[in-house]
């Protein structure tokens, strides 16, 4: 992977919830900082607060980041000295993020995006298909299916809301494999067959 020199580069880290996307993003950004590269991190603002915040992983790692309303705000906030741009929850941005990432990479920046590749129905999420297509490097992470312990590629919603975006605490979703995934929520009683701790041990 070309992370040295002055060539621009787009990396996408995707997968379902709990697959370690934020952890991996944080890890790559930390390494860039150790290499003395200036890093800026953005994520979509969930509400109207634009104070500095943290991206946090489910294992409580965190990294300071700037919440933004849209892609335009990412571009206007990037400093001349920045070498690496991290973007979390990339699925929530509109399609203009694709062009923005191309622009940044063509200017010589390393762009690292993390996002859900699929929504709770298993459909491609927002601009992720285009981002995956134009990326120079793609990582598709797996979580652990909380029903059977196999690698999980789906985010199972456990509530009956039908909006594509439901921002809630971890209990609203769980990771499942293709065969345990139940987008219609018809087999709610089937979960979880084995404890998560045991499932994690088989990963
Ligand atoms: P993502 O950003 O993909 O939602 P995070 O990086 O926030 O994932 O969290 C990953 C961490 O979540 C794992 O390292 C593990 O500690 C924890 N975790 C909780 N449930 C699961 C699961 N079902 N499968 C894998 N990891 C899980
Ligand atoms: Zn399963």
Image (spheres, rainbow, N blue to C red):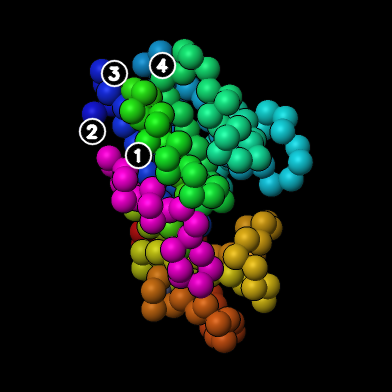
**Is mark 3 in CB contact (under 8 Å) with mark 4?**
no
The residue shown at (68%, 72%) is 161
Ligand 2 shows up in which quadrant of the image?
A: bottom left
Which segment is the magenta one? 119-139
Quadrant of the snapshot with the C terminus: bottom left
Q: How far apart are the two marked residues, 3 and 1, measured between alpha carbons?
A: 15 Å
The residue shown at (51%, 64%) is 119
Q: How far apart are the two marked residues, 3 and 2, measured between alpha carbons?
A: 13 Å
Image quadrant where residue 134 sits: top left
Q: How far apart are the two marked residues, 2 and 1, measured between alpha carbons?
A: 10 Å
Which residue extends farthest bottom?
A: 186
Query: Can residue 7 be seen here?
Result: yes
**Label 2 belongs to which residue?**
1
Question: Which mark sits nearer the N-terminus, 2 or 1?
Answer: 2
Q: In this view, does 131 lie to the left or right of 169?
A: left
**Label 3 belongs to which residue?**
6
**Residue 142 coordinates in the image, percent (x, y):** 38, 57
Question: Which mark sits nearer the N-terminus, 3 or 4?
Answer: 3
**Label 4 belongs to which residue?**
37
Q: In this view, does 198 lie to the left or right of 47?
A: left
**Label 1 belongs to which residue?**
11
């Amino acid at each position: 992977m070309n992370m040295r020199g002055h060539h621009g580069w787009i990396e996408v880290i995707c997968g379902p919830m709990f697959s370690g996307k934020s952890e991996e993003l944080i890890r790559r950004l930390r390494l860039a900082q150790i290499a003395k590269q200036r890093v800026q991190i953005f994520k979509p603002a969930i509400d109207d607060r634009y104070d500095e915040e943290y991206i946090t992983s489910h294992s409580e790692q965190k990294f300071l980041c700037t919440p933004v309303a849209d892609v335009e705000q990412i571009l206007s906030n990037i400093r001349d000295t920045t070498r690496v741009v991290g973007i979390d929850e990339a699925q929530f941005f509109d399609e203009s993020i694709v062009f923005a990432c191309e622009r940044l990479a063509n200017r010589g920046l390393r762009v690292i995006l993390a996002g859900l590749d699929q929504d709770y129905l298993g459909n491609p999420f927002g601009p992720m298909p285009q981002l995956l297509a134009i990326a120079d490097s793609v990582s598709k992470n797996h979580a652990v299916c909380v029903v059977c312990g196999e690698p999980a590629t789906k985010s199972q919603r456990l509530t009956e809301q039908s909006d594509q975006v439901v921002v809630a605490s971890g209990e609203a979703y769980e990771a499942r494999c293709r065969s345990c995934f139940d987008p219609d929520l018809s087999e709610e009683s089937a979960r979880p067959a084995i404890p998560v701790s045991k499932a994690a041990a088989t990963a």
